Amino acid sequence: MRSLEQVGAHLTVIAGHRYGEISEVFNRCLMPVYQTSYRWTGNRLDAEDVTARVIVNEFGRLDLPQMVMAVDEQLVDATVEALGKHWGDGYGVSPLRWSAFPACEVAAPWRSTLSLRALLDPLPGELRLVTVLRFLRRRTVGQIATQLGVSQQATAILMFRALEDIGAEMGFGPALDDPSQAREVAAFIDHLVTRRRPPRFVATAAAFQALLAATCVHAAIAGNDLPRARFMRSLEQRVYSGEWPRCNAPM
């Protein structure tokens, strides 16, 4: 049983006053950092890379005890920066374009996230069907094309437009109606659904919005954004060992 002093220290953190030990920061912040990273990358491997970058770099800079709000804001800013590097290095997204997404929106899992139903319900019937078949039923583009009686290219464009509509509803900006990279976006989704690291390519503005919508849809499916126990143990060992080498994991 914990002593009254230990209980009091725990309640102080819960009340939002201060962090006294690195373990308190780790226990409270690891899941929000990982789920934020997953929401904006859409896959486990990239989310682990971003999370490791944030935890290793920022935990090495913490000077405790420190106010909870100040530490949380530091980690939010670091997560937004690491995600910007992911999109910049992998998809050619400029810092200016990434900065158009405010930190309060990118770091939403620290507060609340849209449910899958909230993301899909505004879609018109055919676009909603295509999205459900691809992300939830995990049907391939070819299988969906056969079911709808259209070509695979037409199916990819339907999926692209569904994601454009989702992105517009989420406030990413108006649908840009440029499906020139519909095939690349379809390949990206294929890797999300099959739990592989998506291929990199230089994304157009319209494709970037579609990719972000895809990552949010995939993260909203129950259980997808839960980290692997092995990954959590690995970071935990580094936290408790006090070893803070810089994270050079590829983004």
Image (cartoon, rainbow, N blue to C red):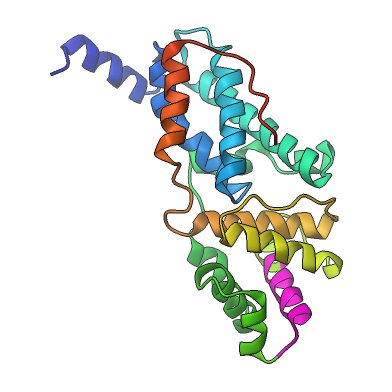
Can residue 61 be seen from the camera position used here?
Answer: yes
Residue sitting at x 74%, y 35%: 85
Residue 61 or residue 4, whichever sits in front: 61
Query: Does 157 appear above or below 57?
Result: below
Q: Does the magenta stretch include residue 153?
A: yes
Residue 28 or residue 108, whichever sits in front: 28
Asked if residue 100 lies left or right of residue 21, the reply is right
User: Which quadrant of the figure has residue 58?
Assistant: top right
Asked if residue 179 lies left or right of residue 119, the reply is right
Can residue 122 be seen from the camera position used here?
Answer: no
Query: Does 185 appear above or below 208?
Result: below
Q: Does the magenta stretch include residue 103?
A: no
Picture quarter with the N terminus: top left
Query: Does 15 appear above or below 117?
Result: above
**Where does the image place residue 178, in percent across and percent down from the top left?**
85, 67
**Where does the image place residue 88, in percent across and percent down from the top left?**
79, 39
**Where does the image place residue 84, in percent across and percent down from the top left?**
73, 37
User: Which quadrant of the figure has residue 65?
Assistant: top left
Bounds of the magenta segment: 150-164
Which residue is at the far left?
1
Residue sitting at x 47%, y 18%: 238
Asked if residue 153 lies left or right of residue 251, the reply is right
Residue sitting at x 17%, y 12%: 4
Residue sitting at x 83%, y 69%: 179
User: Which quadrant of the figure has residue 89?
Assistant: top right
User: What main secondary structure does the magenta stretch of the protein show?
Assistant: helix
Query: Does 69 appear above or below 93?
Result: above
Residue 240 or residue 81, whichever sits in front: 240
